[in-house]
Image (cartoon, rainbow, N blue to C red):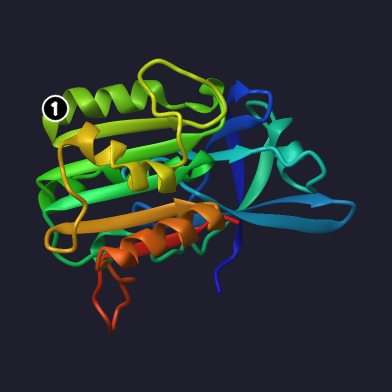
Amino acid sequence: MGEWLEATVVEKIRWNDGLFSLRFDAPLPAFKAGQFVRVGLDVDGERIARPYSLVNAPDETPHEIYFNVVPEGPLSPRLARLEAGDLFQVHSSVTGTMTMERTPEHRHLWLFATGTALGPFLSMLKTDAPWQRAERVVLCHSVRTASDLTYGDTIRELLHRYGNRLTFVPLVTRETVTGTLQQRIPAALDSGDIERLVGLTLRPEDAHVMLCGNSDMIEAVQQRLEARGLRRHRRREPGHVTVEKYH
């Protein structure tokens, strides 16, 4: 159920021409890191709404969403034009099953994201839960160009705080960028480059994997994980892989 709530833009971050974050104040109820909220604007008398994951940790304000602009889309170009002080709507029903509370026991947590799907993983990593559960965390973020590598300050802060317990692996597929892998995530698993870089083997004995992003990446990575003996995690059938598709 729930209801629509008024949200006020606190700050807009423009990462590049098609990539934005909005920080906003709204009386959202308590939520779990990794969950998403419906965001809406009224256009010609109709409320247009889409789900966006929250980037902020549950105890962190203001709230924050991270999105790419779909040029012909009805909502994202309008969200990108909002400025501090502008209003939009968020729904009070914050939901989603990709949370740490739902994962089984594991020693190594592998987080694979494409594009803006980095957001919910940052929300999780800013909480205590991953660090109480796992000895090592691997965060892989795949993007097209260097300008799509975002939230650098947040990632550096996490690396400083957790040291060698966290490894960040950026992948840039359409440019050669020093310090990144120029491969998509499935290819980097096939080649073994991610595991060599991290110094861990991704295996069912000690790993839990979270996949968030575009469906092509998720399907391709799931196939490779299944070949290694890692199966989809479900409430009634505990496994090794948690999935959240963005499109």
- Looking at the image, the residue that sits furthest to the top is 178
Q: Residues within 10 Å of mark 1 (few under 14, many from 20)?
A: few
Q: Is residue 96 left or right of residue 85?
A: left
Q: Position of residue 245 (x, y in %)?
A: 51, 59
In the orientation shown, which residue stands out farthest toward the bottom?
Answer: 236
Front one among 230 and 56: 230
Q: Secondary structure at mark 1?
A: helix
Q: Residue at x 11, y 50 (%)?
A: 132
- The answer to which image quadrant residue 45 occupies is bottom right
Q: Residue at x 9, y 46 (%)?
A: 135
Q: Quadrant of the C terminus?
A: bottom right
Q: Is residue 120 visible?
A: no
The residue at the point 62 percent across, 22 percent down is 16
Badge 1 amino acid? Gly
Q: Is residue 48 left or right of residue 173?
A: right
Quarter placement of the N terminus? bottom right
Dot 1 corresponds to which residue? 163
Q: Is residue 159 left or right of residue 85?
A: left
Looking at this view, name the residue that lies furthest to the front: 191
Q: Point out residue 181 in the picture as x, y percentages from the top left corner.
A: 39, 29
* Camera-nearest residue between 220 and 68: 220
Rendered location of residue 179, percent (x, y): 35, 19
Question: Whole-percent x and y of residue 227?
Answer: 31, 65
Q: Is residue 240 left or right of residue 21?
A: left
